Image (cartoon, rainbow, N blue to C red):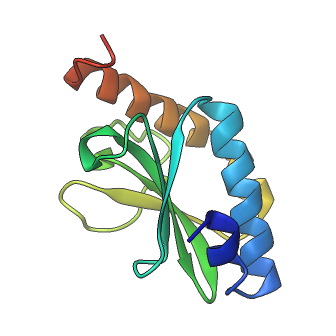
Amino acid sequence: MTAIELLETYPPEVRDLALEVRTWIGATVPNLQEMVDGPAKVIGYGFGPGYADMICTIILSKRGVKLGIARSAELPDPHGLLEGTGKVHRYVALTRSSDLRKPGIKQLLKAAVAAWKKRSKKGA
């Protein structure tokens, strides 16, 4: 299943927002690989096909989109954008494309890349 095929199963407002998030991720961190998990309703992005190389995810629901940041429980979040109670991963809830311009959101994604580089031999 491709990302587009997965997104076609969602209402237009969710699909359109997810497409904008997808474009934003690609512009913010070029060269990420896209991985689709249809049953989980998640589109993942990373520097390799495995969980260890994951940087972020687009988490889909019938009512909205969340930008999941891998290992974000370990990252600084001075703007208080991260939600969720996960011990490892948290997310930023998005309701409109302008949410991608919130102060701190781009820094969270770049911090996730920096953390991956620090812990990964591939990033060295």
Across and down, in percent, residue 12 comes to: 81, 82
Judged left or right of residue 32, residue 23 is right
**Residue at horizontal 50 percent and vertical 44 percent from the top:** 79
Residue name at image x 36 percent, y 45 percent: 49
Q: In the rendered view of the protein, which quadrant contains the N terminus? A: bottom right
Identify whether 6 is placed above or below 88.
Answer: below
Position above or below: 50 against 63: above
In screen coordinates, is 42 left or right of 63?
left
Q: How far across and how far down the image is residue 111, in percent?
A: 42, 30
Residue ID at (32%, 21%): 117
> From the image, which quarter does the C terminus lie in?
top left
In the image, 90 versus 80, the foreground residue is 90
Q: Most extreme residue toward the top, as rendered?
A: 124
Coordinates of residue 64 in the picture (x, y in percent):
63, 79
Q: Nearer the viewer, residue 33 or 10?
A: 33
Total numbered circles:
0
In the displayed structure, 123 sits above or below 111; it is: above
> Which is more toward the observer, 124 or 65?
124
Quarter of the image where one finds residue 98: bottom right
Q: Is residue 1 left or right of residue 90?
A: right
Residue that appears at 67% across and 87% down: 9
**Residue located farthest toward the front when viewing the structure as drawn:** 1
